[in-house]
Amino acid sequence: MRRPLGQHFLFDVNILKKIIDCSAIIADDTVVEIGPGSGSLTRLLAERAKKVIAIEIDRRLLRRLKENFSTMKNVEAIAGDALKFPYETINGRFKVVANIPYYITTPLLFRLLEFREKISSMTLLLQKEVAQRVIASPGCKDYGVLSITLQLYTKPTLKFFVPKGAFSPPPEVDSAVVHFEVSPTPLYKIKDEAFFIGIVKMAFSQRRKTIMNSLRSFKRIKDALLEAGIDYRSRPEELSIKDFIRLADGLCE
Ligand code: SAM
């Protein structure tokens, strides 16, 4: 069942507690929750963290949330779109913990990555297939732009699966909890991050083509592949992050 605003609520206390445990929140933490909905996760977060900033787009849910949390002074419920929220205005570094609305998964992940200097970790409930893409290794059918971009700035770990029946109403797909340790800087040394991401996107824009063909707009591509020690007949999904870095560094000289 597809719901507007991705409203699939989680009430199973055992699963909610497992998510909190995976997030490793301590008493001094500020936590940002995206889409608190009816507040089941929010309550457990507020019992552990110093402060919870809960961003909810649905004003009807937000009104109820504010009423329910009126006595918990460490919960700040804010009306807003998580894709546009000015995360830079939050004091200090924070952790993100959320059962996110699936219709904005990819743009939200990329938006949060923009604030990697402020975010120490993210513990997110994602669609199972997105979770598999995020943690995928080279050679795997799920490996692509999302895997490489996230693994460039974070260390993602798939924690556990959540069946669709655990939600109310149930979504169409199963889910998984992924914990990301976020690094403010790339985990690998790169000459030009934006150029590197551009190369990765270009390479995967035509997945079935060889890397040589996808990047043929670069005159030096054959030499750059040779210098990077990459077989020009390789497909993009066969290249590791380090392969892509050597290639991009060579091409941006
Ligand atoms: N956290 C609750 C739970 O676990 O039961 C609700 C999770 S539900 C999957 C997603 C929530 O995100 C809904 O409450 C929905 O209204 C909210 N939402 C949808 N789009 C949003 C957006 N762009 N920004 C902020 N919240 C959003």
Image: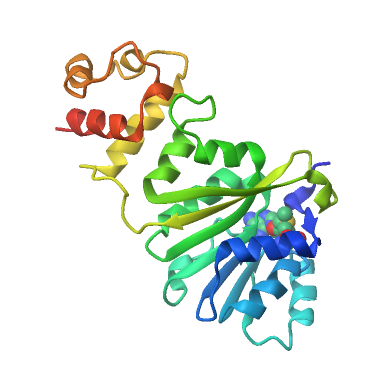
Q: For ligand 1, which image quadrant applies?
A: bottom right
Q: Is residue 142 left or right of residue 196?
A: right
Q: Residue at x 79, y 68 (%)?
A: 60
Viewport quadrant of the N terminus: top right
- Is residue 69 positioned above or below 217 on the image? below
Residue 40 found in image quarter: bottom right
Q: Residue furthest left?
A: 253
Q: Nearer the viewer, residue 17 or 3?
A: 17
- Which colour style is shown? rainbow
In the picture, measured across the screen, residue 220 lies left or right of residue 85, that is: left
Where 68 falls versus 19 (above or below)?
below
Residue 216 % position (x, y): 29, 15
* Image coords of residue 94 (percent x, y): 48, 70
Q: Can residue 76 be seen from the camera position used here? A: no
Q: Residue 78, how many percent across, how many down?
A: 63, 72
What residue appears at the point 52 percent right and 59 percent down from the top-left corner?
122
Q: Is residue 82 above or below residue 65?
A: above
Looking at the image, residue 14 sits to the left or right of residue 103; the answer is right
Residue closest to the eye, 250 or 226: 226
Q: Picture coordinates of residue 92 (x, y %)?
A: 42, 75
Q: Quadrant of residue 19?
A: bottom right
**Quarter residue 116 falls in:** bottom left
Q: Residue at the spot x=24%, y=42% of the render?
A: 190
Query: Does 201 sit above or below residue 183?
Result: above
Q: Is residue 127 visible?
A: yes
Q: Quadrant of the C terminus?
A: top left
Query: What residue is at 57 percent from the left and 63 percent from the top?
Result: 23
